[in-house]
Amino acid sequence: MTAVSPVGQRARNADLVRDLYEVLYREHRFEEAGRLFHAGHVDHDPLAGPAAGGPVGHFRSLTERFPDLSADIDHLVAGNDRVMLFATWTGRTPSGDELRLHTAELYRTRDGRIAEHWNVADRDVLAAHGVPGLEGDGEQPAAPGLHGPHSAAEQANAELVLGAYREVFSEHRLELADRYYHHDYRHHNMRTDAVPDGLDAFKAFFADNIAAFPDLVTTVDHIVAAEDRVMVLVTWTGTLTGAWSGGGPSDLPLRMRTCDQFRIEAGKVAEHWEVVDYLALRRAGLPTP
């Protein structure tokens, strides 16, 4: 059996990321960023690159637009040197317009500091508030596969999730969904309840997706596994040549990024949470929730 990374390492990395959110994203103590970020930090968020002054400069610019901007961590999974989480960002403009933004964040740690960052943001919300720099599809470099030692159970959970993306979503074999999902599994979208609970509803929903995007393919760009949880960053590509959700066909391409967290129970997915970049759906010609 593969040796498991000490629990303490995962706990320390989780505490580091929680400290980041408390110090920087809740209390706005910008002067402490040096102890949180590695000197060689690389940020793959297109909005937080060198031109924006990195993550601190990007957050400063957002606080100019939303002075009371704050973030709460909703779900966090720490696996060796990687920590992935969902966050809800709230704030108001000086005129009182309310922001509620859902994002997914992936951090790689090194020497007790944050060395690398990827994310998925619901850019549809940012576009509605006139935030600039949303051109392109938000593509970020991948780092596929588990990193560092994992237990046999964690490896099996990761393979389960990867198999579902390969066979059910990319190969469109919905008849195999029973192999991967519990019949009464629960679904949680951070923005909408469009997908009801249960395997039958899941199959019906994705049958409509596949009818709308017959060439739909998924690519798992990142995966983190810890205990009974698996989180992934995924890129969905296809062409809207059918009709779905009151829109299409548009013959426009889709390149959408999501983050999905799964709770595994008895070898199948029992629960699922997701953050979706809905701006990509809008650009493909579909209405957003």
Image (cartoon, grey):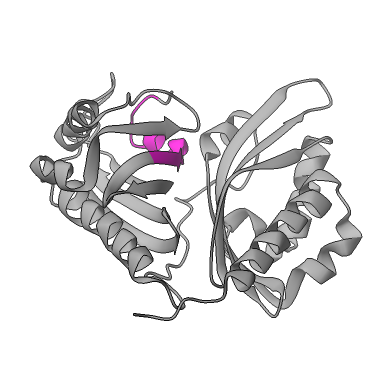
Q: Residue at x 87, y 57 (%)?
A: 30
| Residue 202 drawn at (x, y percent) | 24, 31
| Residue 214 drawn at (x, y percent) | 14, 41
Q: Residue at x 57, y 38 (%)?
A: 102
| Residue 186 drawn at (x, y percent) | 35, 32
Occupied quadrant, residue 44:
bottom right
Occupied quadrant, residue 65:
top right
Q: Which quadrant holds the N terminus?
A: bottom left
Occupied quadrant, residue 67:
top right
* In the image: residue 103, left or right of residue 214: right
Magenta span contains residue 273: yes
Q: Nearer the viewer, residue 156 or 71?
A: 156
Q: Residue at x 15, y 41 (%)?
A: 178
Q: Nearer the viewer, residue 77 or 126?
A: 77
Q: Give the magenta range.
A: 272-287
| Residue 32 drawn at (x, y percent) | 87, 63
Q: Nearer the viewer, residue 273 or 275?
A: 273
Asked if one can make out residue 215 in the rendered structure from this viewpoint, the answer is no
Q: Which quadrant holds the C terminus?
A: top left
Magenta span contains residue 212: no
* In the image: residue 281, left or right of residue 209: right
- Establish if 127 lies above or below 143: above
